[in-house]
Image: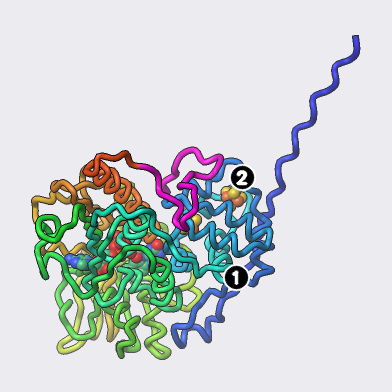
Amino acid sequence: MPAESPPAPKPAPPKLNPVRVSIAEEAVAERTTDFREVLHAYSKEDAILEAKRCIQCRRPWCVEACPITQDCREYILQVAKGDFDEAARVTLRENPLATSLCKVCYHYCEDACVVKKKGVPIAIRHLKRASLEYGESDLVYVPSKPKNQRVAVIGAGPAGLMAAWELGVRGYSVTVFEQEERYGGLMQTIPAYRMTDADVETDRARFRDLDVTWVKGTKVGVAFPVDRLLKEDGYQAVFVSIGTSTHRTLGVAGENLPGVLPALDFLKEINRGADVKVGHEIVVVGGGDVAMDSVRSALRKSGGGHVTLVYRRGRQEMPADPEEVHGAEQEGIRFIFQKAPVRIVGTDHVEGIMVQSIELGPPDAGGRRSPLPVPGSEETLPCDTVIVAVGQKADLQGFGSDLDLKLTSQGWPEGKGKGFQTGVPGIFAAGGRSVVYAMGTATEVADAIDAYLAGLRGEPTGPRPDPFGGEGTFVRPAGYTTPIRI
Ligand SMILES: Cc1cc2nc3c(=O)[nH]c(=O)nc-3n(C[C@H](O)[C@H](O)[C@H](O)COP(=O)(O)OP(=O)(O)OC[C@H]3O[C@@H](n4cnc5c(N)ncnc54)[C@H](O)[C@@H]3O)c2cc1C
Ligand code: SF4
Ligand code: SF4
């Protein structure tokens, strides 16, 4: 009997290159004098080199971790081949806010990237930027056959914009109502050294052939009641995507003194080009991303002043994006941990902030260690400006109890029903803790609205059509198994 041939050797696992192609950034001394962009785009050549590090996993964890199922593995492949036009098309196929997100997304995909086990993950967000910078990105979305049904979207933040896109490409007629004069929601407060209004407008311009009407300067619930949309104005469904447009306060004495600035107003006014004044000794209270944007913006506005961040928990507990914390540290921001404000000191202007030491107790139900004030540990930090960045909340004026809204721990309202349906049939509500998470929940809402309206038409519902008018529909990339929520 002939001897059995030995089994074919298993292919060697692909070699991981743990070293990321570095991303150039503006030098600290220059960038802190104005609001110029900090991170530079990759050159074409560097983008191709970085994309070649991706081993094209059969199970793409990066895609599973993206709340909008962006097929990043595919656009990375196209960049690696040097086909930037195809990379841009693939990117925009699932991501109508890609020009904004390629600058500010918290890149959950990178945290899940397999290369992170050995070194620095693939620069997935930055490769998205390279796709759009070097590829043909002035593409226009195409609506499918009109459905002759109207949807009102209240709020033009990332959730509202995503829903308008999802429903617009499915052939619905959408009206987006926004209380402000500009679109983008809280993206309007992100400082220009990270992204600008022009990025939102570039994204919105690709919607131009969809049946989307934009109504700005209209606060729904105040300008007219919400239920008028369904009862009198001819809309068959409403999406309440009002987010968290107002700031939380410290609730301490002295908060109304001149020199105390709510972070949201401070950042928004700077972006509007207003002449925002800060002093030379600035204290920012908070530990999240808004606090990071505030310290770095205050530094740029202060003309050589000193900026201190006061946070009531420790460094490990800070919810801010590590990339932003690193940027603030590079720029010389002083961090004071485990101190909480007791009152703001001054007679007719801020002169200081009294803080108290905090000990961290055992973890609460959410796993965060609870802050416990230490009696007798008060001290006053002299300063002339205090910026309050301790969170946001929704402005629910005009949104009644009939909607039965749930307020999330981070403040935005959402419906409790399937697909975020509220207590009123046809009205849905949702938002998100980051731009891309808000977009992800908006997709869920759009699916639910599509199903609801298809039911009214007596038709079955289907997947999202190809937003560029091709024959295909939305399919998850090969190898995708289950969404990861980070
Ligand atoms: C300073 C700052 C920096 C941030 N940085 C990042 C970042 O780098 N990356 C990231 O992913 N996320 C970041 N975020 C978080 C992100 O911006 C939000 O998670 C996201 O914008 C939420 O989207 P949304 O659509 O749910 O709500 P929002 O963005 O709050 O949008 C809601 C919109 O509804 C409008 N509105 C409210 N009430 C009404 C009404 N009655 N009628 C009409 N319109 C109304 C508001 O004016 C607003 O435009 C940042 C947030 C802030 C404040
Ligand atoms: S949208 Fe954000 S999470 Fe999704 S692939 Fe792009 S950078 Fe990653
Ligand atoms: S997980 Fe990382 S290496 Fe794998 S496909 Fe995604 S980006 Fe490439």
Give the camera-side residue of 236 and 414.
Answer: 236
Specify which label sits upstream in the sequence, 1 or 2. Answer: 2
Lateral position of residue 118 relative to residue 381, left or right:
right
**Residue 416 placement (x, y as % from top left):** 21, 45
**Residue 427 placement (x, y as % from top left):** 18, 51
Lateral position of residue 99 relative to residue 223, left or right:
right
**What's the residue at 55%, 41% (across, down)?**
478
Amino acid type, residue under disc 2 in the picture: Cys
Q: Quadrant of residue 378?
A: bottom left
Question: Of tags 1 and 2, which is closer to the observer?
Answer: 1
Amino acid type, residue under disc 1 in the picture: Tyr
Could you tell me what secondary structure mostly forms the magenta stretch? Answer: loop
**Residue 313 visible, this orientation:** no
Task: Tell me which segment is drawn in magenta.
Answer: 462-486
Q: Quadrant of residue 479?
A: top right
Q: Compared to 122, does 25 lie above or below?
A: below
Q: Which residue is mark 2?
A: 57
**Residue 28 visible, this orientation:** yes
Q: Secondary structure at mark 2?
A: loop
**Residue 6 placement (x, y as % from top left):** 83, 23
**Residue 48 placement (x, y as % from top left):** 67, 63
* Mark linked to residue 134: 1
